[in-house]
Amino acid sequence: MNSAFNVEKILIPTPFFAPSFKAGGACKSLTNLVDSLGHQINFDVHCLNVDIDKTVISPPEHCRNIGLSKVIYHSPSNFNWRMAKSCLEGARLLYLNSFFAPAFSLRFAALRRWRRTMPMLVAPRGELFGDALASKGSKKRAAIAAIRASGLYADAAWQASTPAEYEAIERMTLRLGIAAPQIFIASDIANVSRVAHRRTASKITRIIFLGRITPIKNLDFALRAVIGMSEPCNFDIYGPIEDAAHWQDCLQLIKTAPDKHTISYRGPVAPDAVIPTLTDYDLYFLPSKSENFGHSIQEALTAGLPVLISDRTPWRDLETAGAGWDLPLDQSTFTDALDRFASLSSATRNAMREHAQATADRFSAKDAIAAHRHMFSTLLNTLPLATQ
């Protein structure tokens, strides 16, 4: 193995890293990246020792080694400007995984102004899509104006996970007054393996929603679609409650469900329990307003679940593939799709399960890893493109 991997330290400041799992896709994307390449590349991850709900996940200032890489879990009270400055020492590349995060992106970008020779890579992780920007819009508009005025990202390189995010980054860099930005496309790395689907046929269709309870995931829309179904169903909701007001709205909707539907909240799911949980259901339902990648969609397909999702994710043409539906966000359209699925024969459902797993298999983690290696190699000008 080339010794450059031991020398070139890639600094990753991020609020959440495994065993954190309640913070969503960005945390999972970084965890999968370090798990996949941490034995070849020297990643230096600095994160908090708590999950998004303040649950302690590690002793403070604990260091965990992953091959050549290390993950240091800091107490929130210790993660200050002085700590951030010390983290930058010896780094050859600053890899930011949020456009807006004050302590983990803006602070580090500001400190890096005294080290302009160190390249900086920004991965917005879906934050620049229209629906994401609209959430807390006035606050984000003010942040964008400040970022433009300060020039914090003026010479940054950018990572897009999909062609759609590439376009979103282009729009934002134009807004920031950045000419000819360097943008890489490196898809999120999935880290799941195909399993046998163990669900047996029953008279009542079992539907699962698995995602953070937040407006962007659109649980209230999902509930209205389920409540409008003619066919009976069991609808189970999994995920951490991130937005309490949104959850209260959802609870009010649940109270209006007819008796033929059973709707239950099951709480968060630990990463190693996701696939086993999914295999107990017939259909995965996530009508999100925006997904940068959609790890849970990929996990559902891998588990053999047909999926019913919006057309605002990278997972498209599912009906053609026989693996589900990706539909525009119209409630009656989703309700019709739910009823249509509920009335399918066992043979048709079994065929859809096979098609779901075949769809997941077409996503190549190998290609995603190669794209990340190429991206880091280009920015550092030293890392080899393949293992020596």
Image (spheres, rainbow, N blue to C red):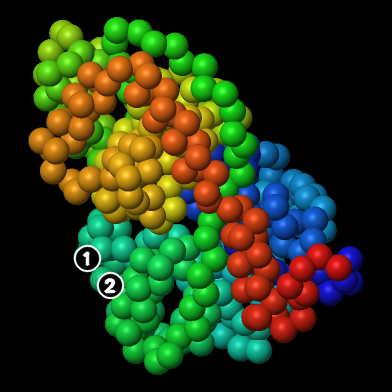
Residue 247 shows up from this direction: yes
Q: Residue at x 58, y 78 (%)?
A: 120
Q: Position of residue 259 (x, y in %)?
A: 16, 8
Q: Which disc number belongs to residue 167?
A: none
The amino acid pointed to by label 1 is Ser
Secondary structure of the residue carrying tag 2 is: helix
Q: Position of residue 27 (x, y in %)?
A: 54, 49
Q: Nearer the viewer, residue 159 or 63?
A: 159
Q: Which residue is mark 2?
A: 142
- In the rendered view, tell whether residue 328 sits above or below residue 114: above
Q: Which residue is mark 1?
A: 138
Seen from this angle, which residue lies furthest bottom?
179
> Counting other residues with Cα less than 10 Å from the Cα at mark 1, is it few (<14), some (14-19), or many (20 or more)?
few
The amino acid pointed to by label 2 is Ala
| Quadrant in which the C terminus is drawn | bottom right
Residue 241 picture quarter: top left
- In the rendered view, tell whether residue 331 sits above or below residue 1: above
190 vs 342, left or right, is right
CB contact under 8 Å: marks 1 and 2: yes
Residue 272 picture quarter: top right
Q: Residue at x 52, y 49 (%)?
A: 362
Q: Position of residue 182 (x, y in %)?
A: 50, 83
Number of callouts: 2
Q: Residue at x 61, y 60 (%)?
A: 367
